[in-house]
Image (spheres, rainbow, N blue to C red):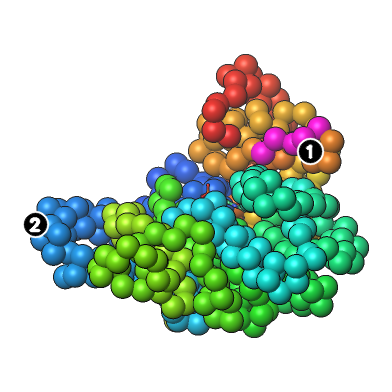
Amino acid sequence: MNLDLDHCRALDAQDPLRSLRDQFDIPADTIYLDGNSLGVMPRSAPARVAEVVTQEWGRDLIRSWNTAGWFEMPRKVGDQIAQLIGAAPGTTVATDSTSINLFKVLSAALNISARRSPGRWRILSERSNFPTDLYIAEALCKDKGWELVLVEPEEIPQALQDEKLAIVMLTHVNYRTGAMHDMTSVTKAVHDAGALMVWDLAHSAGAVPVDLTGADADFAVGCGYKYLNGGPGAPAFVWVHPRHADQCWQPLAGWWGHERPFAFTPDYQPAGGIVRYQCGTQPMISLAALECGVQTVLAVGPLGGMAALRAKSLALTDLFIQLVEARCAGQGLSLVTPREHAQRGSQVCLARAEGAYAIVQALIARGVIGDYRAGDGQHHADILRFGFTPLYLGFEDVWHAVEHLRQVLASGEWQRPEFNQQHAVT
Ligand SMILES: *Cc1c(COP(=O)(O)O)cnc(C)c1O
């Protein structure tokens, strides 16, 4: 690949998705490589949020539950997200947080599995899965007397040969490494092993094509504030395959999951389908912001859809990898993310034995925003993590980001004391 700045500019000029960048208001001095942690604010969000606050809440008050469609918002935004994850209409709701939704679906999967095959009581996941996923599973196992088994990704096929295995819970794209599972083949192997498949799409929804229906998955959850650009703490989403949705209650049986919430009956009657996965009253201001974010991704539809987004994402991450290897050679960086396209999400992680945190801080001081994830001193190294959101990143941005990285490393700038003071949030 030609790695010249001029070539990168030419790639931007030919980019069919270039216009999508205008949906965002990114500060001119910032190259944002952290959309996998907090997506950029859509330009439409401030006015829409102001409308919800001043008009729908301020003037229309409680009437807005009906007149502004507040009550349907989780289902409405859920149906929009469904278009990005291969889910049928009416099977997804935008609600609560990823952690909470995971609790609901794992509990349901546990319940369904216990009835279907009572001798199975193990949940399998990856050791490097996002901690909250592991903690929620650990808490459930503790409560039910089940067991959580953690393995490395390459050990999964072997771990499936377990007659006690009930549920496999994986994150489609790993938050640390950017490695992506083949959703279809893994789901099939899990079903062949007699277990249920729960996918976390936190780093997939809006980033890579996902087809939950085609893969025949059982349950899925995902995040609203990463590639969906829904804003800090945006509602998450939950999807349940229709074959399971009516099988059992989920444990957080709040009134929004009731068949007739406004009948105010003392007993719980779950609504049919995914609606029972709602719990209580949802945050309308946040849902309005999330809808703005989801719309920024759906805008790719007329321009080639998720396939076009994916092609650009791979071109950006390929360019980044090649530039780092060409321009930062000998600086102690090693690629953690798979080179093979089929195994790569929309981020690139680099390991470094020393200084990973400080290098990221030095980059942030230059306006190149990525993040750092600590290793465990054993299985996993400290990493510099860079997310690539094709909606608003260009090829020239990638070139400049690597040039800053080169300068930070070559000059030893990262060793300055101010870059070595750790913040609470990394
Ligand atoms: C970001 C992320 C979460 C976040 O969960 P919250 O409940 O929003 O804090 C969960 N799981 C994975 C895999 C993530 O990447």
Q: Where residue 74 sits in the image (x, y, percent)?
A: 37, 66
Q: Amino acid at mark 1?
A: Ala
Write down the region rendered in magenta: 373-377
Packing grade of label 1 (10 A; few <14, some 14-19, many >=20) is some
Identify the residue position indicated by label 2 in the image: 59
Identify the residue position indicated by label 1 in the image: 381
Q: Amino acid at mark 2?
A: Arg
Residue 142 visible:
yes
Packing grade of label 2 (10 A; few <14, some 14-19, many >=20) is few
The residue that appears at 62% across and 60% down in the rendered structure is 106
Q: Where residue 55 sits in the image (x, y, percent)?
A: 13, 58
Q: Secondary structure at mark 1?
A: loop
246 left or right, relative to 74: right
Q: Residue reaching furthest left?
A: 59
179 left or right, relative to 226: right
Principal SS element in the magenta part? Answer: loop
The residue that appears at 39% across and 66% down in the rendered structure is 268
